Image (cartoon, helix red, strand yellow):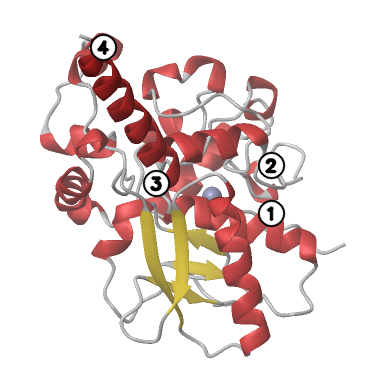
Amino acid sequence: MAEVLVCTPKSLPKDKWIEAAERAVRVNPANHPRMEKLVRAMPDIKLDRLRIAVVTAKYWGAEGVKLTVGFLDNPPRDLRKRILLHMNAWAKTANVQFVESKSSPQVRIARIDQGEEAGYWSYVGTDILSIPKREPTLNLQGFTMQTPESEFHRVVRHETGHTLGFPHEHMRRELVNKIDRQKAIDYFGATQGWSPEEVEQQVLTPIEESSIRGTAHADPRSIMCYQIPGTLTKNGKPIVGGRDIDKKDYKFVGAIYPRPNKTSNAGKRNASQRSRSRSGK
Ligand SMILES: [Zn+2]
């Protein structure tokens, strides 16, 4: 049986972290971490700019997401359409739109299947703005029209979640316990440049204990659950996360990027309530 490929988190090189975090806060001020909360959670840690950059969120603006999408290796039209369709699955409850474009697309999809760039990955949210224009921001190793529909649900929607700014959800303790700690520290150190402490925070802290992050909505069936390759688990089997956008994911994305008709209706309602109460006076 071929091994199930899982998502490899993709973060920017360390020397871009501060600049990218500052940009994220410009795009959406709510990305800035809540400092009191941080200080309470980590009283002994010096909160320098790098530390703050690490915990800065990468969501797009609350007015919604409209991103152009391009393909770097010229896939056939039916495949491009199918990928776009699954990316736009997030639009069911949210103000999110992905549109194909050939002129300097913001999301750049590749299907690299060899070397360090192989696998399934995407940079997170506004981080894609820090990637050089000719380089991919999202990789779907080996995707073709023959790829099973279930993989489009599991992989394309997950990677698109990253592009929308969602990080990985922490795993439940029973899953974290399946990971070989030392292998994880070596692997994420080599592939992401994470310190052992960062691997502890990002991968080895179960969801039950990771509430300090504040952004995650504890949902073990989320499409954004952490995925771990079989090389890092004690039993050699990969940990495969959620297989599709679930109800809580849909609710969460709708809260982060509310549909405009919803807000404008609410706005109208409020306005008419206001005018009613004014006229009632
Ligand atoms: Zn992922």
Quadrant of the frame with the C terminus: top left
Q: Residue at x 88, y 62 (%)?
A: 1
Real-space CA distance between mark 4 and mark 3, rounded to the nearest whole angstrom: 29 Å
Q: Position of residue 177 (x, y in %)?
A: 66, 25
Q: Is there CB contact under 8 Å for labels 1 and 2? A: yes
Helix, strand or loop status at disc 3: helix
Residue type beneath disc 3: Pro
Residue type beneath disc 1: Arg
Of the numbered discs 2 and 3, the one sitting upstream in the chain is: 2
Residue type beneath disc 4: Gly
How packed mark 3 is, by other alpha carbons closer than 10 Å (few <14, some 14-19, many 20 or more), is few
Q: Which residue is mark 2?
A: 242
Q: Which residue is mark 3?
A: 260
Q: Which mark is residue 154?
A: 1
Q: Residue at x 70, y 42 (%)?
A: 239
Of the numbered discs 4 and 3, the one sitting upstream in the chain is: 3
Mark closer to the observer (2, 3)? 3
Q: For ligand 1, tell me if the residue under mark 1 lies within 8 Å.
A: no
Q: Which residue is mark 4?
A: 280
